[in-house]
Image (tube, grey):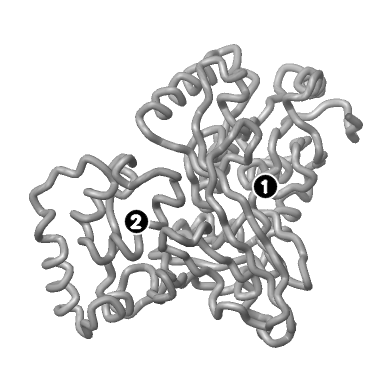
Amino acid sequence: MHTQHTHYDYIIVGAGLFGATFAERAGRAGKRCLVVEKRPHSGGNLYCEQVAGIAVHAYGAHIFHTSDRRVWRYVNDLVEFNRYTNSPVANFYGELYNLPFNMNTFYRLWGVRTPAEARERVSREVAEFANIEPRNLEEQALKLVGRDIYEKLIKGYTEKQWGRPAVELPAFIIKRVPLRFTFDNNYFNDTFQGIPVGGYNPLISKMFERAEVVCGVNFFDDGVRAALEAKLAAGSGKILYTGKLDEFFGYKFGRLEYRSLRFETEVLDTPDFQGNAVVNYTDAATPYTRVIEHKHFELSVPLDANPQTVVTREYPLACSENCEPYYPVNDAKNNTLFAQYKTAAGEQKIAERFLFGGRLADYAYYDMDKTIARALDVASAEGL
């Protein structure tokens, strides 16, 4: 592996958002950083590719949203964001409903027109489940929203996402279901929301501006780890590891479970396929969970400026040994296993040389703003 320099202050394993944020902070502080990434590109799951003149979110839709002013200022100082607002639509066997659950949804379901009517109907829906102690996700959802919303808008989507019946899923997965008694289709409650103009690649490139990035390098290939450790600055150099924590330790306690995704992308000869960026398919018969139409993310470009469009269907699947891990299965068994790995990562001989962070190393499903906030905190603890 050829690199520009002999020694580095930080070697970052993984060129995703966490590693990029840390690299930006370290580089700005004058530190020499080497980033290694096993994929052929940087950016992790934020990576966008140009297809038919459209910025395609290659690993699923990513909409930036946050109420953290520090994070919002941070990303906007790097690139310009548009004002995209996430307002997904649910398709249940051809019936269309607005998400999140709001007055538009309730009107479509029950014909109610006022918040008072909607609240009264929801109360009736949940009344028969008021006294149950939920033993699984299905019972939890029924207690929260009743049968109509659950069966049309939650059950099928959730069972496809997790690959098992809702009665076999733990209740804690669906601790609450937001119900809005207003005609507001904005999915997120956060203060700030948008997508970088032109996609996420400009943001990632800006973050790595002061770092050396080498793609196609797997930390676990023979000799790579030793070669990287030899490039650390004597005495003070550290490796920031953002990959799977169980893999770092050779799976010695066992493998952590994940869910994964398969993407099916195609170019269509129409300027607008579904009229919205995100349509969730909540019925059980449709094998995919949602369809993304990428050109709707670019607000500055008229839809008819391009006679073609690009859509991506997302298929959930079990995560095999070589799959791309997306969603941690944070049940009691896996959380206990992760705690063992976290304890091992905190041992002095490891902690003196390695930093850990990101959705895989922390075994947590982070939104982008939380990823950046945690990376900024790790960088701050390093004096950057």
How many marks the image carries: the answer is 2
Q: Label 1 belongs to which residue?
A: 44
Q: Residue 334, how many percent across, how many down? A: 42, 28
Q: Nearer the viewer, mark 2 or mark 1?
A: 2
Q: Quadrant of residue 322?
A: top right
31 sits left or right of 378 in the view = right
**Label 1 crowding class (10 Å Cα cut-off): few <14, some 14-19, many 20+?**
many
Q: Residue 43, how many percent across, how many down? A: 70, 49
Numbered disc 1: secondary structure: helix
Numbered disc 2: secondary structure: helix
Q: Residue 359, how many percent across, how many down? A: 54, 40
Which sits in the foreground, 261 or 382?
A: 261
Q: Label 2 belongs to which residue?
A: 155
- At horizontal 77% and vertical 48% (from top left) the residue drawn is 41
Q: Earlier in the sequence, mark 2 or mark 1?
A: 1
- At horizontal 57% and vertical 57% (from top left) the residue drawn is 314
Q: Amino acid at mark 1?
A: Gly
